[in-house]
């Protein structure tokens, strides 16, 4: 063992970085779909649906992602489902992201001014029509900056998937380090790589927020 | 159906009760609006006039009493809200146009989505109702590009497009300066002249006097005095005397 950091090591780390992006995209899409359902359930006219979705959100938000990942990996195995690290990590991250995006989006939907709901109601639109044609188009504009901002959290949190043996950026760094024993150099490279993925998103989110600020008068005509 | 409703009032409230927590907002309110009639609800802030108006379109549920609107029993829990709201148009103080849609889309949305009207017909209709409020040239503008008065006129046009049997106006000029108020009031006057049945909550005493067939003065959740527009010049209760007096001072 030993030796120096070479192109092969960097290629391996690059592959890990690609898996980090891949896992992030999976978590965003899966979490986005489930999260959208959660957001709608949280404002459902049915009390039982509101309650169930609130319990889900509280449970997930009150549990460390690390624990959720272990539960996903070993839990699914315990009930007889042999799952790969990718499936376990994807499922766990989806559940995790759904709880947070659901809450973020619920807030965005509810921050569409109440008179907009009433105006739509006064025009005899059904609840579904009100939601699709009046409320959601406005809520999506409000939701874009915080959602992009939350993607930064998703990317960083995928590093925890290394504990179930999924070889993303963090895990590939550990593997390279195991052969080179140059932890500072390797983890510095990893840190810079994460930063390079996250910082552009942060900037983008900030810019979106500034643009929203300018257009705020659009949202509350009065 | 036509014959059934032609004899009965379009809107009737009988002994309507409504509380927000311990606060009694409506305390046995009764009045009726006949077809083609313009009724002005006046009174101080907090007198219950806006709540009474919102009860007609069931934006508030009443605790007791009876409300019948175009044959719908609005006080009953099983009232068909969508049918009710196709018969009733409501215009709010804050316009509430949909900011992400053009004026044309604002107007065609409900006729297409609720009545299943074809897009081409709905667009013709949009042009027609916008002409009625003098805004034909704003068809493709977004609400934010319009002045407050124009937005309110567009909101009236949006309601008209559903061809309601009765229109409710909830302090529709309170957010506007006198000049913009005048252009909105002109539109409402024209509607009255065309025979639209209307219930309006207003602070514009001169306007109420000029347009209303009947005035309902509300005080502390009750109908305190009611009668033709002339009661504004010759009020019989001290409360209305005082109210009209302060109103005149303000204008």
Image (tube, coloured by chain):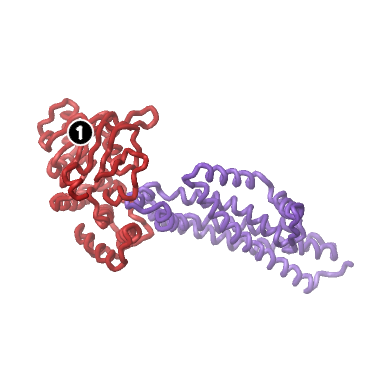
What residue lies at 61% left-to-right and 58% top-to-bottom? Answer: A152
Residue A135 vertical placement versus A168 (above, below): above
Instruction: Give how far across and how far down residue B143 sits, in percent.
Output: 32, 58
**Residue occupying the point 66% across, 62% down:** A23
Between A148 and B163, the one nearer to me in the picture: B163
Chain (red): B
Q: Would residue B76 appear left or right of A91 to someone viewing this image? A: left
Residue A165 lies in quadrant:
bottom right
Q: Colour of chain A?
A: purple
Residue tagged 1: B217
Q: Is residue B147 visible?
A: no
Left or right of B197? Residue A124 is: right
How far across and down, in percent of the image, does residue B237 sit? 16, 26
Q: How many marks?
A: 1
Helix, strand or loop under label 1:
strand
Please state if A213 lies on the left or on the right of A149 as rendered: left
Name the residue nearer the viewer: A60 or A81.
A81
Residue drawn at (88%, 67%) of the image: A2
Residue B134 falls in image quadrant: bottom left
Residue pictured at 19% horizontal, 31% vertical: B243
Q: Residues within 10 Å of mark 1 (few under 14, many from 20)?
A: many
Vertical arrangement, residue A3 with respect to residue A66, above or below: below
What's the chain of the residue with tag 1?
A: B
- Residue B245 in picture, x, y percent from top left: 16, 32
Quarter containing the C terminus of chain B: top left
Query: Is residue B67 at all visible to an observer of this figure?
Result: yes
Residue A123 picture location, percent across and down: 32, 52
Residue B128 lies, with reference to residue B40, above or below; the image says below
- Which is more toward the observer, A177 or B4? B4
């Amino acid at each position: 063992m030993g030796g120096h950091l070479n192109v092969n090591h960097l290629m391996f780390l690059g592959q890990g970085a690609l898996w980090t992006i891949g896992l992030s995209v999976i978590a965003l899409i899966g979490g986005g779909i489930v999260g959208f359902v959660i957001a709608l359930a949280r404002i459902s006219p049915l009390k039982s649906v509101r309650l169930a979705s609130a319990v889900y959100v509280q449970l997930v938000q009150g549990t460390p992602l690390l624990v959720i990942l272990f539960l996903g990996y070993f839990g699914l195995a315990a009930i007889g489902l042999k799952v790969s690290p990718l499936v376990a990590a994807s499922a766990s991250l989806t559940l995790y992201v759904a709880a947070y995006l659901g809450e973020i989006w619920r807030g965005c939907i509810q921050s569409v001014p109440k008179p907009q709901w009433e105006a739509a109601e006064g025009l005899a639109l059904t609840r579904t029509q009100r939601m699709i044609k009046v409320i959601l188009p406005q809520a999506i504009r409000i939701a874009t900056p915080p959602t992009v901002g939350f993607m930064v959290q998703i990317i960083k949190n995928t590093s925890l998937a290394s504990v179930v043996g999924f070889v993303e950026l963090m895990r590939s760094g550990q593997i390279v380090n195991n052969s080179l024993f140059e932890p500072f150099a390797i983890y510095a490279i990893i840190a810079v790589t994460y930063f390079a993925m996250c910082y552009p998103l942060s900037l983008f989110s900030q810019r979106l927020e500034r643009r929203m600020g300018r257009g705020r008068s659009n949202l509350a005509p009065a | 159906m036509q014959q059934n409703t032609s004899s009965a009032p379009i809107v009737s409230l009988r002994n309507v009760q409504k509380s927000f927590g311990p606060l009694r907002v409506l305390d046995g309110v009764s009045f009726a609006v006949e077809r083609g009639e313009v009724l002005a609800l006046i009174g101080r802030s907090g007198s219950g006039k806006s709540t009474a108006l919102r009860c007609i379109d069931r934006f508030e549920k009443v605790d007791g009493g009876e409300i019948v609107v175009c044959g719908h029993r609005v006080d009953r829990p099983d009232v068909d809200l969508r049918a009710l709201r196709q018969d009733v148009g409501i215009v709010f103080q804050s316009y509430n146009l949909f900011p992400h849609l053009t004026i044309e889309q604002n107007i065609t949305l409900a006729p297409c989505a609720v009545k299943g009207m074809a897009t081409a017909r709905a667009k013709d209709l949009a042009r027609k109702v916008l002409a009625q409020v003098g805004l034909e040239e704003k068809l493709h503008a977004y609400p934010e590009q319009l002045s407050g008065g124009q937005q309110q006129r567009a909101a009236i046009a949006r309601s008209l497009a559903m061809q309601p049997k009765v229109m409710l106006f909830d302090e529709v000029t309170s957010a506007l300066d006198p000049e913009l108020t005048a252009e909105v009031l002109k539109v409402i006057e024209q509607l009255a002249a065309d025979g639209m049945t209307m219930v309006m909550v207003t602070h514009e005493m001169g306007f109420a006097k000029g347009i209303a067939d009947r005035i309902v003065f509300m005080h502390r959740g009750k109908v305190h005095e009611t009668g033709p527009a002339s009661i504004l010049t010759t009020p019989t209760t001290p409360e209305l005397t005082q109210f009209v007096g302060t109103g005149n001072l303000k204008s």
